[in-house]
Amino acid sequence: MPGKIDLSPNASVRMISVNTDNVACAYLANLYIPIFSLEKEKVLRRYEVHNQISGIHFAHAKKNVIYAVDDSFGLHVFDIRSESKKKFRLNPECENHNVVSTAFSSNDQTIAVSSSTFAGGISDVRGSRRRQENHENVISLYDARYPTNPITTYYKRHKSSVTTMEFYQNGDFLITGDSSGAIKSFDCQLRDEDNACRWERWTTKPISKVGIINKRIVYGMSGREEATVFYDSKGSLEVLYGSVSKTENGGGDSKRSNALFKKPEWCIGLIKGVNDDIPLVAVHGVAKETFISLTAINQEGHRQSTPLLSYEGHSRDVKCMTATSEFLLTGGDDGKVVVQIANFKNPKFGSDALPNHHPLILNRAKLAEIEDYGNPTSSEASEDVVRDSEAPSSSESSKKTSSSSSLLASESPKPEKSKFENSEDSTSSESANPLKMCSEGKIKKRKDERGGDAEKKEDEEAVESKKPKIEEN
């Protein structure tokens, strides 16, 4: 590792999807969809399409089936075991509409499609009638089993083009980001848009990517420069770090971001980290350079001063990324897919490290903070917690940056630790710690041995002093 798979000498890799058998598919700008093996590092077959593809996804249960949506609402279904392919029209009443992005639910039931315009065939809340309307920046939902008619559409909340979408791991919630910097979440089980909108936040830059880390941790990347991370659980939303607003006009600013990637740096996304102390890892690099770096981000959003790994990447710009529990895949304008190990416990991780890290990515986190905000150690951050039927609560939490080479070893308490635990449903208690209980037992035993006669004498005196009281009673 890393492995390099050459898909095309002259076409950009725009998007990638991987199934559980480590077979991947990609969409190339020359209207081809190659199917390739990560283990063999070779192309197995190719499909040709006649329109630009806006989203491509492997089914989860049927791991050999691929769903691809083109920019004119065409749904292409491929079975990679053969040359079989089918094409449907998502809502046949729609023609010549520009599909921007798509998402496919983990339960294989729902396809979400965002388009710059959408007209005709919009189902009402009851689903009993269809009305002819024309809207911009629309999210339409389809049943993957019967994709010819939309289940419902959301067209009120987003005022700009929805550029990126992902379904949560539960298959029902959807996170979206648009070109104005808005990040929103919808419950796709609900047809009425006002009821379906779970929460919304605004950043100052266009959202280049939204992503899912685990069941509760989601993030958005603003212009490939700033990461905003959310803890979304049980009707409450907390901004762990990120410069976002609660209102469109910028009111109610929440915590500022420490995960900054100032030009010429870029960051294409985040992946799951090593442990609770370094729960997230950024995938980033420097413009016009060929390497890719993986840098840890701690619970407060501070970047590690030195990357975990820098390795040889793409000769041209990186356009997309996707990650599984084992592998990280990036696609670039050079027509190649670079495969890297994403399981940091794998003994092979780091075996392909470059001898030196690029100087522009060393200690960049602190420099970026100072450039944007001044001295980062003198700032105050407020929590952004929104609960059902409660006003947002805020608390002072001054953040300290470490002067050592690693920002991971922070002495400040980490109240968010449980939010990043690899076992998300685990409930650890200090009093139930067997190591601590064992240690306390040994200390008590040594104390009893060292006390000797003096302690016995004190105990006897205490007993004697209590006897009259007992007799009186």
Image (spheres, grey):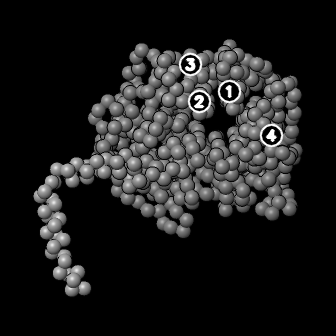
Identify which amino acid the numbered label 4 is placed on.
Answer: Phe
N-term mark: 1 or 3: 3
Separation (CA) of disc 4 from disc 2: 33 Å
- Mark 4 Cα-neighbour bin, 10 Å: few <14, some 14–19, many ≥20: many
Q: Residue at x 31, y 51 (%)?
A: 441
Residue 361 x, y percent position in the rendering = 41, 26
**CB within 8 Å, label 3 to label 4:** no
N-term mark: 1 or 2: 1
**CB within 8 Å, label 1 to label 3:** no
Looking at the rendered structure, the secondary structure element under dot 3 is loop
N-term mark: 3 or 4: 3
Q: Quadrant of the N terminus?
A: top right
Looking at the rendered structure, the secondary structure element under dot 4 is loop
The residue that label 1 is drawn on is 22
Separation (CA) of disc 1 from disc 2: 9 Å
With 132 as the anchor, is 181 left or right in this view? Answer: left
The residue closer to the viewer here, 194 or 81, is 81
Residue 122 x, y percent position in the rendering = 81, 54
**CB within 8 Å, label 1 to label 4:** no
